[in-house]
């Protein structure tokens, strides 16, 4: 067995999930070379008995009651039996050759411990703005990139479709057990958080391996109407800034720098000159950063008050 495909799901949209499963049935990699695991992250009602898993090799559903994508990924890593693990979400449709290309890339680039893909967006209705302005809806990779520099973010794989070697996955599980603060990252039912995928990729760097992205790996991200509103984008931007602030502190011991007098003037100018929607997103990012700093201070992580004016 070459690959464990691990799909993490919480209250999925069933028509989208059906497309995800059908794309897996159509994979060109022979069925005896991969397994399929669904991690039901406490969906209501549970997914057991509601899904057609026919045609999917070694398919099984496991339940992870601890809510949050970090916990779901951890459980999937623990269940996986193959040396390569593909993280999949319930709204992402793999190209037919995704698994086959993954095996080829893993052999060719044996020094890379985690790698990701190109993402195209399929919107439920005509988008009002360019696709790349919808947070994490689409990713264009013009050339293959890899690096073992933890702060080289262009080579950072995104969560869905990301490929993780088992040794990296096991090290990530150990990290969560040693420092449960990292489990605060990743989406939950209440908050649109992120950065758990970054930490998984950076764990590869910790082990002396690299991380990367490859243009030939492609999937389609299904974007429902509810995720196309300004309100959702603001919440996503807030959650991303909140998560990024916490992750930068946990991983790099970095806090956002305080603005100088001229920095404050420049901020005001940028906000006033921005179009209203982008101004709201910029303010949401600032708010997410401030709330993360307040929470870390309240939790006793910081030795002294740190804030951005």
Image (tube, grey):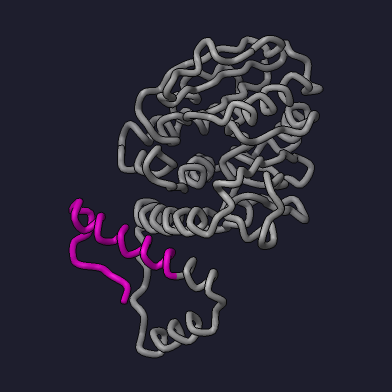
Q: Please provide percent x and percent y for residue 267.
A: 44, 82
The mark total stands at: 0
Q: Is residue 212 above or below residue 14?
A: below
Q: Which residues are magenta?
A: 283-309
Is residue 107 visible in the rendered image? The answer is no
At x 39%, y 45%, the residue is 191
Residue 95, image x and y in percent?
A: 77, 33
151 up-or-down from 278: above or below: above
Q: Which quadrant of the figure contains the N terminus?
A: top right
Q: Residue at x 36, y 23 (%)?
A: 65
Estimate the x, y position of residue 122 in percent, counting from the top left: 71, 44
Q: Quadrant of residue 18?
A: top right
Q: Is residue 66 left or right of residue 298?
A: right
The C terminus sits in image quarter: bottom left
At 32% across and 72% down in the image, what residue appears? 308
In the depicted view, which residue is nearer to us: 66 or 277? 277
Name the residue nearer the viewer: 242 or 104. Answer: 242
Residue name at image x 65 percent, y 46 percent: 212
Q: Nearer the viewer, residue 85 or 140?
A: 140
Query: Is-magenta flag for residue 285?
Result: yes
Q: Quadrant of residue 222?
A: top right
- 172 horizontally vs 15: left or right: left
The percent coordinates of residue 129 (x first, y second) are: 66, 62
Q: Is residue 72 shown in magenta?
A: no
Could one spot residue 69 in this view of the protein?
yes
């Amino acid at each position: 067995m070459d690959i464990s495909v691990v799909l993490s799901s919480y209250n999925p949209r069933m028509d989208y999930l059906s497309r995800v499963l059908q794309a897996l049935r159509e994979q060109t990699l022979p069925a005896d070379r991969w397994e399929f695991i669904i991690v039901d992250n406490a969906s209501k009602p549970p997914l057991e008995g509601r899904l057609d898993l026919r045609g999917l090799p070694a398919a099984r559903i496991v339940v992870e009651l601890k809510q949050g994508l970090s916990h779901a990924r951890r459980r999937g890593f623990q269940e996986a039996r193959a040396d390569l693990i593909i993280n999949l979400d319930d709204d992402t449709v793999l190209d037919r050759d995704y698994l086959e290309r993954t095996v080829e890339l893993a052999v060719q680039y044996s020094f890379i411990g985690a790698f990701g893909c190109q993402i195209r967006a399929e919107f439920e209705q005509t988008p009002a703005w360019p696709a790349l302005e919808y947070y994490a809806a689409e990713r264009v990779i013009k050339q293959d990139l890899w690096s073992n520099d933890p702060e080289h973010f262009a080579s950072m794989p995104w969560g869905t479709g990301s490929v993780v070697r088992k040794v990296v996955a096991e090290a990530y599980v150990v990290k969560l057990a040693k420092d449960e603060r990292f489990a605060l990252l990743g989406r939950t039912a209440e908050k649109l958080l992120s950065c758990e995928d970054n930490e998984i990729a950076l764990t590869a760097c910790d082990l002396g391996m690299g991380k990367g992205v490859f243009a030939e790996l492609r999937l389609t991200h299904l974007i429902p109407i509810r995720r196309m509103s300004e309100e959702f984008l603001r919440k996503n931007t807030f959650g991303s800034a909140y998560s990024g602030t916490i992750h930068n502190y946990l991983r790099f011991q970095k806090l956002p720098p305080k603005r100088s007098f001229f920095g404050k003037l420049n901020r005001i100018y940028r906000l006033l000159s921005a179009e209203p929607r982008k101004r709201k997103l910029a303010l949401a990012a600032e708010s997410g950063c401030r709330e993360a700093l307040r929470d870390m201070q309240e939790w006793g992580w910081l030795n002294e008050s740190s804030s951005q004016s």
